[in-house]
Amino acid sequence: MQNEQVNSKKLTKLEKSWVLYDWANSVYATIMMAAVFPVFFAAQVPNNQGDYWWSIGTSIAMAILAISAPIIGAVADYKGHKKKIFVALLFLGLAFTLFNALVDQWQLMLVGYVLSHIGFSGSCLVYDSFLPDVTTTERMDKVSSYGYALGYIGGSTIPFIISIGLIQFGSHIGIDSTMAVKLSLVISVLWWGLFSIPFLKNVQQKHYIEKPKRGVMKATFKSIGHTAVKIFKNKAIFFFMLAYFFYIDGVGTVINMSTAYGSTLGINATGMILALLVTQLIAMPCSIWFAKLSKRFGSLKMLHAAVTMYLFICIIGFLMGFGLEEKWFGVDVALVLFWVLACMVGTVQGGIQAISRSHFGKLVPPENAGEFFGFFDIFGKFAAILGPALYALIKGMTNRSDYAILSIILLFVAALIIMALKRKEMEIQPEKE
């Protein structure tokens, strides 16, 4: 049965159920985090400080998750716990996304965003750790890539198109812009919840450790410590995760701050939303394309290329701040640059995440893959604090959003330096214990 699964070109029912959660939760990433809600939120905050408070909220959400994630990951490894924790985080995300559709004060919206973000990101953390439970080691690259690919296309299909239609044409049927955004959030909740059902129904925890009869918390923190020691002793894993810490932080900041940044520059909301739709559509095939190119050129070279691309993305984002009054053939230069950025991001956004996960999978000992992947996800969540906080700091000091986006270059430069200096170490395969 296992050999049939390895040789099969099609995804199994279990693998499809796992992949569908990427399809399900991507609507939150698109509407709540990237395209619709950030623009609406920024418009509600006075004195053009929407991106400032959005970055603060994102940093708070990630800080809370980063502190709690090691405990969540360790407890989830106990027999019968992983699914329960996943369900709790899923419903936290669903509940507070719906909450934001029911409130009007921007302060309450910020609270709702923080809590829903914790639920969303936390559920994704546990979701990733289910990968060894749904497929074989030989198929992890394929299943993981399809997850990212379908994730990027999922949120940009029916719910996103309906949301765009409501925002643009809702006035013809008596729906104003505020109500259109609220309905978009309701649609997000329904989509996210509905397509989570196959995962909830079919995916079960297969790999686990027995829960100690007593001293659970002591055993949990001891396990976290052992995992950390193993990572620090393995140079390949340690230096890769260090580089990953910086570049994935930059990637996340670009995703979270793109529309909030664009709105502060006065870019038309419709143009930004359509550009982000293009990003999602491009990211889908490019995720799979990056996986194929990594087999030819090597995963580290592809990651190096993707990080370099993001460095140029930040530079172009900075230049947008100087083109606010310029027009090319009657079109705002800033909007043109935003579209250029959307296409550039689309080519690398899915690929950098898919290849990061697959390269890490090649480095870790197969018999400890679940434990290391759990720590990998946790490490990524810790990384999500620095970028938004750096953006908020520079914006607060200079009151210039373009300088704030330029500061994110520091994260990508740090990653490139580590990748250049420690390339050989990162390519070393770990010895089996």
Image (cartoon, rainbow, N blue to C red):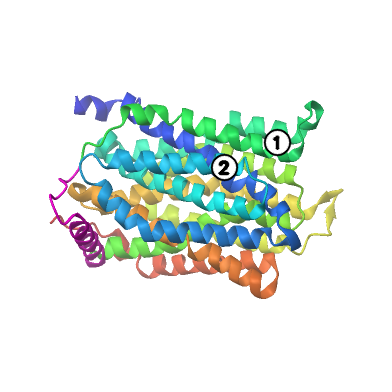
Magenta segment range? 208-233
How crowded is the residue under tag 1: few (<14 C-alpha within 10 Å), some, or many (20+)? many
What x and y, as percent, mark residue 111? 56, 53
Q: What is the x, y in percent for residue 39? A: 68, 49
- 398 left or right of 110? right
Q: In the rendered view, would you say 244 is above or below 289?
A: below
Q: Can residue 224 be found in the magenta stretch?
A: yes
From the viewer's perspective, tell me whether residue 327 is left or right of residue 345. right
- Which quadrant of the rendered structure holds the N terminus? top left
**Spot occupied by residue 352 in the image (x, y as percentages of width and height):** 46, 50
Label 2 element class: helix
Mark nearer the N terminus (2 vs 1): 2
**Residue 225 on the magenta segment:** yes
From this view, report whether residue 89 is shown above or below residue 398.
Answer: above
Q: Which mark is residue 99?
A: 2
Quarter of the image where the C terminus is located: bottom left
Q: What residue type is labelled 2?
A: Phe
Residue at 57%, 56% in the rendered image: 254
Q: Nearer the viewer, residue 323 or 24?
A: 24
Of residues 193 and 429, the one drawn nearer to the viewer in this rendering: 193
**Residue, x 68% and y 74% (percent of image)?**
398
Q: Nearer the viewer, residue 341 or 374?
A: 374
Quadrant in the picture for residue 79 = top left
Q: Can residue 239 be seen here?
A: yes
In the displayed image of the protein, which residue is found farthest to the right?
Answer: 330
Q: What residue type is labelled 1?
A: Ala
Nearer to us of marks 2 and 1 is: 2
Give the structural element (helix, strand or loop) at label 1.
Answer: helix
Which residue matches tag 1? 180
